[in-house]
Image (cartoon, rainbow, N blue to C red):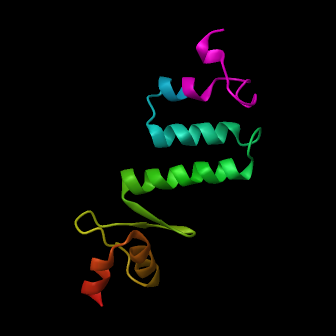
Amino acid sequence: MELKNKQVGGDHYKEGIQPFDYIEANNLDFFAGNVVKYVTRHSKKNGAEDVQKAIHYLEEILAREYKMLVTPGSYVELHESNGAPKEEGCLSVVAAKMAGIGQALRTSL
């Protein structure tokens, strides 16, 4: 058996292209690769849990590559210079606390 046709546990990748073939062909990093993996298998394996995992990895991409802080229901863009939220107001304070940006809060209060 060719190694790329081997699947350990379940048969949720048996149809279509294997996620790792797509990930490799498109030179995706760990986070984007996991998005592909979880979106590909959600309807045949863990349902909503796999969708939540894919969202989690997308949020990691937003934070790492686009310097956007993920808060419940929204995304806050951060200043590159000091990591403080660009927006003012309540959402910014919550976002700053979630990211551990205590310094930005201490200087503005």
Q: Nearer the viewer, residue 88 or 21?
A: 21
Residue 4 located within the stretch drawn in magenta: yes
Name the quarter where the N terminus is drawn: top right
How many circles with numbers are drawn on the protein?
Answer: 0
**Farthest residue toward the front?**
8
> Is residue 34 shown left or right of residue 11?
left
Q: Nearer the viewer, residue 21 or 49?
A: 49
Q: Residue furthest left?
A: 81
Q: Quadrant of residue 16?
A: top right
Looking at the image, residue 99 lies above or below residue 18 = below
Magenta-drawn segment: 1-21
Image position of 8 (left or right of 27): right
On the rendered image, what quadrant is the C terminus found in?
A: bottom left
Q: Residue at x 38, y 53 (%)?
A: 64
Residue at horizontal 49%, vertical 23%? Answer: 25
Instruction: Name the main secondary structure of what is drawn in magenta.
Output: loop
Q: Position of residue 41 (x, y in %)?
A: 69, 37
**Was residue 10 drawn as part of the magenta stretch in this picture?**
yes
Quarter of image, res 5: top right
Instruction: Tell me residue 68's x, y (percent).
Output: 41, 61
Up-down: is 18 above or below 34? above
Image location (x, y in percent) of residue 53: 60, 50
Relative to 4, does residue 28 appear above or below in the rendering? below
Farthest residue toward the top? 1
* Residue 77, percent from left and from top: 39, 65
Image quadrant assignment for residue 88: bottom left
